[in-house]
Image (cartoon, grey):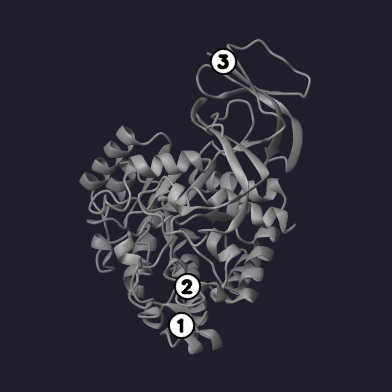
Amino acid sequence: MTTALLNARLVDPERGTVAPGGLLIAADGSIAARLGPDDRPEAAEQIDCNGLCLAPGIVDIGVKIGEPGERHKESFRSAGAAAAAGGVTTMVIRPDTEPPIDTPESLEFLRRRAAEAGPVRILPMAALTRGRQGREMTEMGFLLDGGAVALSDVAAVADTRIFSRCLAYAAGLGALVIGHPQDPSLSAGACITSGQFASQLGLPAVGTIAERIGLERDLALTEATGARYHADQISSAAGIAVLERTRASGLSVTAGTSIHHLTLNVLDIGAYRTFFKLTPPLRAEEDRQALVAALADGLIDVIGSFHTPQDEESKRLPFEEAAPGAVGLETLLPAAMQLYHAGALGLPGLWRALSLNPSRLLGLDTGRLTPGAPADLVLFDPDHPFVLDRATLRSKSRNTPYDLQRMQGRVEATWVAGRRIYAREAA
């Protein structure tokens, strides 16, 4: 059955345009044709988009699922529902589960569960070292053959010699390594960025020098081994400066950041608000502004939610003891709209970082509105105002720092391979 999506504003990250038109979706779930504003093709189903924005579905790198081991925090089913409602059509999930995804058997279990329960596309990462302990390499070749799209420990590998060997072996396989650029010895035990505010709160702090040192090491080893390297979360001006020098030298590496670090700063922690405890910790406003500028300049390639569900018992603790992380699948799009409404980035620029660049990084054919590409799409109203109520979130865990915040941007519908998996219910 063909479907025609009409009367839309097409957000095209490849062309860098927002233009009136529509899309014709073929029976095989791909985009059959791009339509002009006056085109009315014959189709089994015609959907009027009412002038709203139609864009490629979001590809979210770094999503944590609670299966196996922590299903009470998040399951594939609940995460899939949250992703669909947030316009996320592909989740690239992390291996920091209990136990970690570090063997072909555990990877196969995860892929089966994902296929059974998830309405969106789910692509797994696998651990770089056994047990994520940083002591011994995993069977990288078997993990890649089993469907892993990248290798990561979701934490810095402290032993430089081990990490160098991992990068060299991964380079031989052509594998993508996703690193977490933080110096682990400096970051150990810290829960806030150092500065006057951290001193006032009396919390153990770490400076952005930890990010700089960690990134310098990782990039030096990347240059030496020729590995494909992606820094998962650049969060500071110090990290941006290192990345800029590296790019200027000709080394081809990519970098991402989290939507929380683009829209929040360390002062948002306020009176020990644990929903704002993240890894790496929130930075100064100057760092946040530097991240936004680097994103606009193309120095930072990818925006992710870094969806990290934590239950109430893990968060309702003193700040120093509370678990780090925040959910983000449903809040990623409206939070990104803050950058759009502030005039920092246009919609095509945002969707390059949310969809096109992550697709290119992983070798996917998503993130585009060209004929032949998968019809993974999100229809959204960038201007719709609302107050976020975390009780309405579809995730099992609802640890969002945006609770009760005024936001703009609402997802109206989501398609994966041409099948509508989410439609907002009329009020």
User: Can residue 239 be seen at all in this image of the molecule?
Assistant: yes
Q: Which mark is residue 2?
A: 3
- Displayed quadrant of residue 163: bottom left
CA neighbours of label 2 inside 10 A, class few (<14), some (14 to 19), many (20+): many
Horizontal arrangement in the rendering, residue 175 relative to residue 7 (left or right): left
What amino acid does circle 2 point to? Pro
CA neighbours of label 3 inside 10 A, class few (<14), some (14 to 19), many (20+): some
Residue 4 place in picture, x, y as percent: 63, 19
On the image, numbered disc 1 is attached to which residue? Answer: 206
| Secondary structure type for disc 2 | loop
Horizontal arrangement in the rendering, residue 307 relative to residue 296 (left or right): left
Number of numbered discs: 3
Q: Which mark is residue 281?
A: 2
For the residues bearing labels 1 and 2, Cβ distance under 8 angstroms: yes
Against 310, is 358 above or below? above
| 3D distance between C-alphas at marks 1 and 2 | 9 Å
Q: Earlier in the sequence, mark 2 or mark 3?
A: 3
What amino acid does circle 3 point to? Thr
Q: Earlier in the sequence, mark 1 or mark 2?
A: 1
| 3D distance between C-alphas at marks 3 and 1 | 55 Å
